[in-house]
Image (cartoon, rainbow, N blue to C red):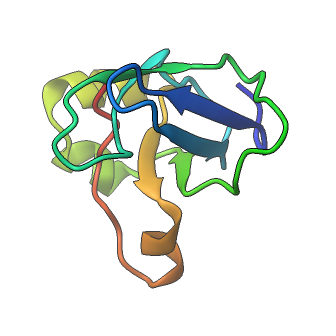
Amino acid sequence: MSKGKINIYTCPGCHGETVTIDRDEGVTPFFLRCRCTDGCAALAQSACYRPRHGHGPPAWEWYAPDAEERAKAGPAMRDHAEMGGLFIRRIDAVSSGGTSGPSGER
C-alpha cells in the first residue's frame, strides 16, 4: 500500500483491533496474527485501508527490512521481503532504540 497509510486489523477471537501504519512502500498481509490479547491465537483481518473514525493511534508499523533483517528471517519471510513485502514491529520498540525482530508472520 502507500507510505503513511493507516490500517486496522480486527480479531474475530478477542474483538481487539491492531492499528498499523505503513512507514515504507510495500505489501502487507490481509491476515495478521492477533497482537491485542496475550494467548489469542486468532487471525485478525485487514480493513483494507478503510479504517473507521475514532480508532486510536497506530501501535505497530510496517517497514521495509534491511539486508541484515532479511538474512536473519526464515525462508518464508525472506521470500516475502524479496517480493516487496513489509515486516511489522511495535512503534515503541523503534522509539526506544530496540527492534522487535522480523515479525512479519501472518
In this view, the residue in front, 31 or 87, is 31
Against 83, is 9 above or below? below
Q: Residue furthest right?
A: 53
Q: Residue furthest front?
A: 14
The answer to whether 93 appears left or right of 64 in the picture is left
Quarter of the picture holding the C terminus? top left
- Count the labels in the image: 0
The answer to whether 83 appears left or right of 37 in the picture is right
Residue 24 in picture, x, y percent from top left: 66, 44
In this view, the residue in front, 72 or 7, is 7
Residue 19 in picture, x, y percent from top left: 60, 44
The residue that appears at 16% across and 26% down in the rendered structure is: 75
Residue 77 in picture, x, y percent from top left: 27, 29
Against 58, is 96 above or below? below
In this view, the residue in front, 29 or 84, is 29
Residue 22 in picture, x, y percent from top left: 66, 42
Quarter of the picture holding the N terminus? top right
The residue that appears at 35% across and 32% down in the rendered structure is: 14
The answer to whether 56 appears left or right of 15 in the picture is right
The residue that appears at 60% across and 43% down in the rendered structure is: 20
Give the image quarter of residue 98: bottom left
